[in-house]
Amino acid sequence: MQTVIRATGEAKDMTLDEPAAFVDDARKAGVPGNRNVGAEVSYRGKTKEVEIVLSEVDD
């Protein structure tokens, strides 16, 4: 099972502070800057959730 860092806008669209905190957490966890980020967007194109895998290896 992969370990991920996930940030959500909960029941709303994300604000700029939420993905900024997500990136900060990923950097602190040692995730390389070239790692792909997954995202879920609303029908209006607003970010609802982002996640990044901490390690490339499946357990």
Image: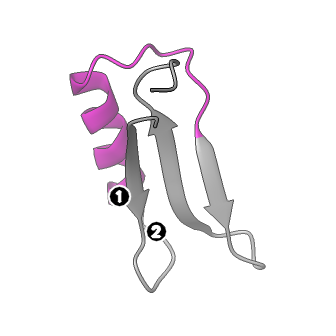
Total marks in image:
2
For the C terminus, which image quadrant? top left
Which residue is most to the right?
A: 43
Q: Quadrant of residue 20?
A: top left
Q: CA distance from mark 1 to mark 2?
A: 6 Å
- Whether 19 is among the magenta residues is yes
Residue denoted by label 1: 18
| In-front residue for pair 41/5 | 5
Q: Considering the numbered disc 2 on the image, is that residue within a helix, a strand or a loop?
A: loop
Residue 48 location (% of width, % of height): 55, 69
Which residue is most to the bottom?
A: 11
Looking at the image, residue 53 sits to the left or right of residue 3; the answer is right
Q: Which residues are magenta?
A: 17-37
Task: Name the image colouring.
Answer: one colour
Please, is residue 33 above or below residue 14 in the view?
A: above
Q: Residue at x 33, y 31 (%)?
A: 26
Q: Which of the numbered marks, if any, corresponds to residue 45?
A: none
Q: Are marks 1 and 2 in contact (CB under 8 Å)?
A: yes
Please, is residue 2 above or below residue 55 in the view?
A: below
| In-front residue for pair 7/17 | 7
Query: Does the rendering let one see residue 16?
Result: no
Q: Amino acid at mark 2?
A: Met
Residue denoted by label 2: 14
Please, is residue 30 above or below residue 17 in the view?
A: above
Looking at the image, residue 50 sits to the left or right of residue 22; the answer is right
Q: Residue at x 40, y 78 (%)?
A: 10
Q: Residue at x 61, y 28 (%)?
A: 36
Q: Quadrant of residue 40?
A: bottom right
Q: Amino acid at mark 1?
A: Glu
Query: Does the rendering let one see residue 53?
Result: yes
Looking at the image, residue 53 sits to the left or right of residue 27; the answer is right
Q: Residue at x 21, y 25 (%)?
A: 28
